[in-house]
Amino acid sequence: MTKDIAAFKAAGSKAALDSLDKIKKDDLGTFITVCSDAKAADSAAGPLAGVPIAVSDNISTKGVETTCASHIVKGYVPPFSGKAVDDLEKAGAVIIGKTNMNEFGLLGAASAYGPIKNPRDKSKKGGPSASAAAVAAGEVPAAVCSDAGGLLRVSASFCGTAAFKPSYGAVSRFGLIYYTGSLDQIGVTATTVSDAVTVLDVISGNDNRDTTSLPEKMNYTGGKSLDGCKIGIPEEFLEDVSADVLKTFEEAVATFEKLGAKCMKFSLKTAKYMQSVHDIIAAGESSAMLAKFDGTRFGPRVEADNWHEMISKTRGLFGPVAQRRIMTGIHLLMAGQYNDYYMKSMQTRTLIIDEFESVFKEYDLLISPTAKTVAPDLGGACGGGCDLELSSYSAAIAGVDLAGLPAASVPCGFIGNLPAGLQIIGGYLKDADVVAAAEAFENATDFVKFPEAV
């Protein structure tokens, strides 16, 4: 059962113990590592004092094993914490554990630690990140997670939680073990939008250890009112969306219009390229980012008679999807392929960014379904092809990542007991507008806590 930050704070010193007890009783596969001795400091102070917070297993935590849900990083205990973790602890939060996820956050790459079950229906997937499932189950009120390829937003859609990915650079990625440097950003999922913003405000800010970090701390309040707000709906973002999810989306559009917004469909010309461009860039970058896992620097090493054999056997610890993604990326970056694929994708990315900039001169916000379907069966392929080698969930997810835009996912309805998600997208650095729209929609509906998690 979902619980917000206020509910956990009300429990005082028992909050962390209650969280640990709930995690122990559940069989959802939400955590890879649980900090069983976690407790609030007696002198804990700050906006998150005593509140248990989960962190995805690809964000470094000092003294706590960080595996990226992969056998090849098993046993790695970072000697430092990522900035996001340091900020959480300074705000009084209790890091309760490391959540399960797709291996390295790669779409379709199974976790080495088993599947993530959906707390609303344990026969369904909880998404590529267990952060949302942990929140939906009431194990924690909020979780911090990488959001490459919609990892966090799609999981929130499947589990019925709120999630927010800020503008690229708003949150330092120091300590994040990412597989795609130009597409990944740390985000937050929580029971409500306001709780997500509370945590996001804690972890935002400049960091000179991250060259992509914005010079000024992002402001998430004081966004544009929905009265007279122009909201665009790219027609291409509705393609291949299931009929049930599309119905909930149309009802969400009607809610925005009741709140005073003007919603209009239009054609986003570069949308047809977004998924392919995203996947080619991600594959190329992952081959470079994951090259450091070779048995010579950190993580396990498979002993062999010579160096080449050792490297080969050690890299055999990658899961099959990760291995194929690396090989695909290497192929795309080869001299004979680089200009035709990777370079062409980077040029097309510029066109995508330019079109988004042009669109946001006419519209204040864009909206779309977060995922094309509700949560699929465990072991089955996700709608939109998330178990395919080179396929993101949708152009809407891919486009947001390519342009580094802020985006929120909020529940917008239920199909049976399974939630559907609404994605709200803002212009670059217009995070406050996205937050304002997400909160207005959330307050006008009753999808946050109904139906409750099983």
Image (tube, grey):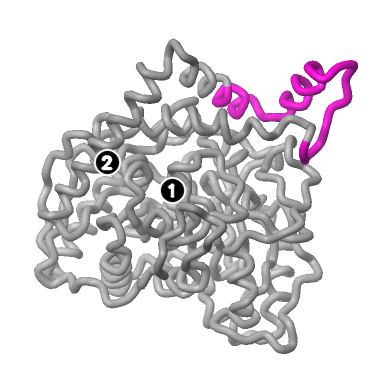
Tell me if residue 362 comes above or below residue 12 in the rendering.
above
Query: Quarter of the image containing the N terminus?
Result: bottom right
Q: Which mark is residue 243?
A: 2
For the C terminus, the quadrant is: bottom right
> To which residue does mark 1 refer?
154
**Does residue 185 appear in this view?**
yes
- Residue 32: where, in percent of width, then height? 71, 51
Q: Given this view, does label 2 or label 1 mark the residue nearer the observer?
A: 1
Dividing the picture into quadrants, the one containing residue 299 is: top right
Q: Where is residue 372 shown, x and y percent of the image?
A: 34, 41
Q: Which residues are magenta?
A: 297-326
Amino acid type of disc 2?
Answer: Ala
Q: Do labels 2 and 1 touch, CB within 8 Å?
A: no
Whole-percent x and y of residue 360?
Answer: 17, 53
> Dot 1, crowdedness within 10 Å: few (<14), some or many (≥20)?
many
Magenta region includes residue 319: yes
Q: Nearer the viewer, residue 167 or 433?
A: 167
- Image position of 438 with respect to 157: above or below: below
Residue type, numbered disc 1: Val
Number of marks: 2
The residue under the point 10% across, 61% down is: 262
Q: Nearer the viewer, residue 388 or 381?
A: 388
Magenta stretch contains residue 67: no
Q: Is residue 220 left or right of residue 268?
A: right
Query: Disc 2 on helix, strand or loop?
Result: helix
Q: Residue at x 12, y 47 (%)?
A: 265
The image position of residue 88, as x and y in percent, is: 60, 71
| Side of 196 where 176 appears, left or right | right
